[in-house]
Amino acid sequence: MNASGSEDGDEVVDVPLPKEKWSGKIGVVVLGATPEEGGTRSASLRIGGSTGMPFLSYEGVSPNRPLIAGEVLDVPSDLPEQVRQEFGACVEDPAEWARCWVEEHDADLICLKLLSTNPDEGDTSPEEAARTVQRVLAAVKVPLIVYGCGNEEKDAKVMQAVSSAAPKERLLLGHAEEAAYKSIAAAAMANDHAIISFANLDVNLSKQINILLTDFGVRKDRIVLDPLFAALGMGLEYSYSVMERIRLAALMSDAMLQVPMVCDTTSAWKAKEASEEIEGHEGLEERAVWWEVATALAALIAGGDMLIMRSPRSAAIVRRAIDELRGS
């Protein structure tokens, strides 16, 4: 702390910013492959690479801007009516929905969720699901995230078909967890795709799944971690703490946690405050948009490198916030 005299005679005290020095660095994962790399994307996207906590530019650099992936469902039956109205009729066709996200709402990439493959619902075949992925890839030129339905046995078959139907596109396939990772890891490795490692709100489990994947042969620069980020009102505080501890451990040189993180903020639309009229509270439409915004901003500050978002209005607000926080 230094003291000096001002022009009017008052003593001026310089208070230094409390800065942390980090020895670790988050790895970089490249999504999407261009024609020169064997794919068909117009450009590849890079996430990760930070050497400090988010948006604290005086502690380290964050060379790659956080990305926003627009959510597309192959069956929109459970889509909130408000979001359906934002997109219009295009939600009935995954390819058109993806095109709308990119051309009208500036999504960086698309997250396609193949919910219709659920054996208890549509039970769409792996081959049909793979054709849906190909149609979306043909409709847009941005990188693609692909999730299955959450059924372990069916997802293994679906991801194998998807991987083979889009070789060298460097998709991001989701997801692998401790109890089930070999099939999806093999599918990703077979055609040079990246993979989402998943752990249920636990620092040690997050590290463990990354160890299992790398021991299986997955390159660390092909792994993006999903630590399960809970929405506002549904456990956000705890998941924020877990994410922040993961990022701090990575910056303190825990090599198996030095991977970028993705956060799915669409769960915000399941909170009653975002989906129900509440006596004494008006403005459900605005409240729902800002519920997803609040969830997304918390995820970014906790260390999220990429967001999966549902509402274009929410995404636009978060995009402006990222620009302001990065000073761009």
Image (cartoon, rainbow, N blue to C red):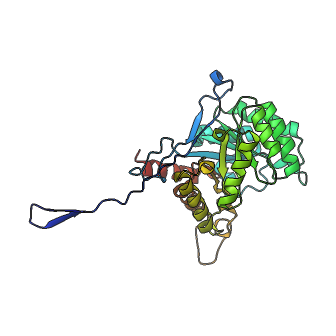
Q: Residue at x 67, y 43 (%)?
A: 223
Taking the image as shown, residue 32 lies to the left or right of residue 293, namely right
Whether residue 36 is visible, yes or no, is yes
* Residue 9, placed above or below residue 279: above
Q: Quadrant of residue 170?
A: top right
The residue depicted at 85 percent of the width and 51 percent of the height is: 152
Q: How many marks?
A: 0
Residue 89 in view (yes/no): no
Q: Position of residue 212 (x, y in %)?
A: 74, 48
Percent coordinates x, y for residue 142 in the rendering:
63, 35
User: Which one is in front, 140 or 180?
Assistant: 180
Where does the image place residue 80, in percent across and percent down from the top left?
71, 58
The residue shown at (43%, 48%) is 60
Q: Is residue 216 left or right of residue 290?
A: right
Classify the position of the C terminus by image quarter. Answer: top left
Say which quadrant the N terminus sits in. Answer: bottom left
Depth check: give the residue in front, 26 or 62. 26
